[in-house]
Amino acid sequence: MITYSNIVTKFEEFVANHFFLKTFSHGSPSDVDLDKFEVYPLLHLVYTGGGYDSNVKTYNLEVYILDSPPRDEDKTDFQKQVISASEQAAEDILADIENGGTIFQFGYDYDLQSAQILPLEDERSNVLAGTLLSLSIGVAYTYDSCNAPLTGVDPEGTDPQPFRSRGLLRVKTLDNVTDVLSVATLNVSNGSLTDDGSGVVTLLTGSSSSGQTTIWKGNTDAANVVSFGPGLTSLNFGTIALGNFSIDSSSDIRAGFAIGTNTTGSGLIALPVSSGSQVVVELKYEITLDSNGVAIVGTSTTGGLFPSSLPFTTWTTAGTNVETATSSTLNVSAFQTSNTLAFNVTATISGSIRIYYTKITIIHA
């Protein structure tokens, strides 16, 4: 386990590597004496006690970062500068502990539980000025990390062990509302945990279909040609010869989506997807105008699943044309119980039209 001696060593190492701090000491506050120290600024470490809770040992520490004014006439301005500089040094300590950086390495996994800082200054002459950093550091503790000096116990003499090497970890929510230190066992739903090896796991939370892309493409039978005249004519899907699903990185359809035609074959009916999903519709069709005039394909939808319009071309010249029209992305805003998609052609002349395929792409929320 990590002892107070280990923590003292780390603070001493921190001072030795810090550009501002020059001297390190530890003990009681009364040990901070001008007659005892010759080189400043200094860091004096005081251990005020600890606690044990949920496999964590807490060390409560007081860190005095102090400097001595070189002469009395500069004392007031000097104290202001020292307090500012010593507070920055204290924040360097907090950053290194919290981030597991240069001195307080991740291997030891110190946990910064709380910290407060106070300025230290005195108007009397020949006194120290600086800051007092009060902090609590948590380390993993399982009551059996050290080998007991008892008859029958074979001591291994191991070095201080990090959280990870003992299978302990910290589990918390992103907003820090729930924060549990040194978790020994984590129970999760069946099928949500994957062992990635080397002590690494992946825990699937939320919907298993979130971010999944489902693509449905229905190819309409080549014999299904719809003739139209002046006015509005509904298109017919007829027989969908090769309706199929394509799902990214999966062989199974996990997201809730189903689609088919209505009883007359004039429209598609689909079950809804989760609110926040994105939907794109693509239609490829062939249209023939018997003479010059005007003909344009339109979209008809109900529910909130399908885009209500596609960028169709307005046809005005006799002949046969093929177009693939793709809608803009529709963000599904609400759960809908009825969703239909149908197409029609509005014309001033006669002609014929057939649907090659309808493609629906859904990125699930």
Image (spheres, rainbow, N blue to C red):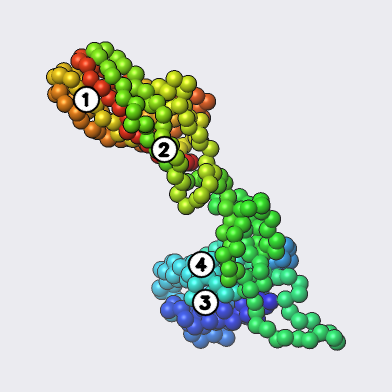
Q: Residue farthest to the front?
A: 223
Report how far apart the C-alphas of labels 4 and 2 lie in the structure: 56 Å
For disc 4, the neighbor class at 10 Å (few under 14, some 14 to 19, many from 20) is: some
Instruction: Left or right? Give the position of 350 relative to 125.
Output: left
Question: Height in image: 190 above or below 227?
Answer: below
Which residue is at a point 41% across and 38% down the rendered structure image?
242
Q: Position of residue 122 (x, y in %)?
A: 53, 68
Report how far apart the C-alphas of labels 1 and 2 lie in the structure: 24 Å
Residue position marked by numbered label 1 in the rendering: 288
Residue 99: mark in rendering: 4
Residue position marked by numbered label 2 in the rendering: 242
Which secondary structure lies at badge 3? loop
Q: Position of residue 7 (x, y in %)?
A: 61, 77
Q: Which of the two discs, 1 and 2, labels the residue nearer the N terminus?
A: 2
Which secondary structure lies at badge 2? loop
Q: The disc labelled 2 sits on which kind of residue?
A: Leu
Asked if the residue under mark 4 is in contact with the one under mark 1, i.e. CB atoms within 8 Å, the reply is no
Q: Which of the two discs, 3 and 1, labels the residue nearer the N terminus?
A: 3
For disc 1, the neighbor class at 10 Å (few under 14, some 14 to 19, many from 20) is: many
Which residue is at a point 68% across and 62% down the rendered structure image?
183
Which residue is at a point 85% across and 86% down the rendered structure image?
152
Report how far apart the C-alphas of labels 3 and 2 lie in the structure: 64 Å
For disc 2, the neighbor class at 10 Å (few under 14, some 14 to 19, many from 20) is: few
Which residue is at a point 63% across and 70% down the rendered structure image?
163
Residue 103: mark in rendering: 3
Q: Nearer the viewer, residue 15 or 304?
A: 304
Asked if the residue under mark 1 is in contact with the one under mark 3, i.e. CB atoms within 8 Å, the reply is no
Q: Which of the two discs, 1 and 4, labels the residue nearer the N terminus?
A: 4
Report how far apart the C-alphas of labels 1 and 4 lie in the structure: 68 Å
Q: Position of residue 132 (x, y in %)?
A: 56, 68
Asked if the residue under mark 2 is in contact with the one under mark 1, i.e. CB atoms within 8 Å, the reply is no
Q: Which of the two discs, 3 and 2, labels the residue nearer the N terminus?
A: 3
